[in-house]
Image (spheres, rainbow, N blue to C red):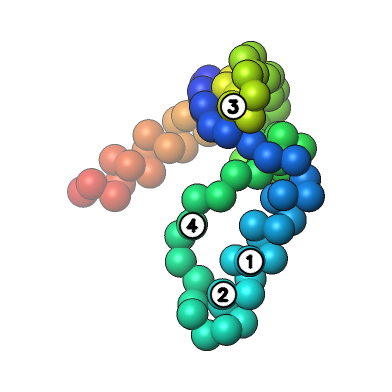
Amino acid sequence: MKYIEGDYYVVPEKEKEYLEKYKARDEEGQGQYHINFPFSLETQKQLFSFAGFSRVELVWEEGENEVFVAEKKFSLWQISHTIISRIIESN
């Protein structure tokens, strides 16, 4: 399976600044919520790896914008298990 993602990124120092602001909101009692702030290229690649993607390639980059192609291989067992689970859930 291939996954393509286009987004913008920041240097690690800026990423840390965004994360600290996000944590401060929670500490101030404002609660956490979904927020979309950019990650560094290093963090983005780690997230793909944590999600099980074995191959991550940066295929385009201009300024702070990038496009990644990530690949995840599935075994026949994983595909069969997913199909059977969905059939059972729908009955």
Q: Is residue 11 left or right of residue 48?
A: right
Per the image, label 3 sits on a secondary structure element best described as strand
Most foreground residue, 51 or 17: 17
Regarding residue 15, the answer to whether it shows in the image is yes
**Which label number is shown at residue 21?**
1
Q: Is residue 54 left or right of residue 68?
A: right
Asked whether disc 2 touches disc 1, contact meaning CB atoms under 8 Å apart, the reply is yes
Q: Earlier in the sequence, mark 4 or mark 2?
A: 2
**Which label number is shown at residue 65?**
3
Label 3 and label 1: CA atoms lie apart by 22 Å
Name the residue rendered at 52%, 27% in the picture. Answer: 6
**Which label number is shown at residue 35?**
4
Amino acid type, label 3: Asn
Q: Earlier in the sequence, mark 3 or mark 1?
A: 1
Most foreground residue, 87 or 38: 38
Label 2 and label 3: CA atoms lie apart by 27 Å
* Residue 25 in picture, x, y percent from top left: 56, 75
Picture quarter containing residue 16? bottom right
Regarding residue 74, the answer to whether it shows in the image is no
Most foreground residue, 11 or 41: 11
* Residue 90 in picture, x, y percent from top left: 23, 46
**Which label number is shown at residue 67?**
none
Label 4 and label 1: CA atoms lie apart by 11 Å
Per the image, label 4 sits on a secondary structure element best described as loop
Amino acid type, label 1: Lys
Per the image, label 1 sits on a secondary structure element best described as helix
Per the image, label 2 sits on a secondary structure element best described as helix
Label 4 and label 2: CA atoms lie apart by 11 Å
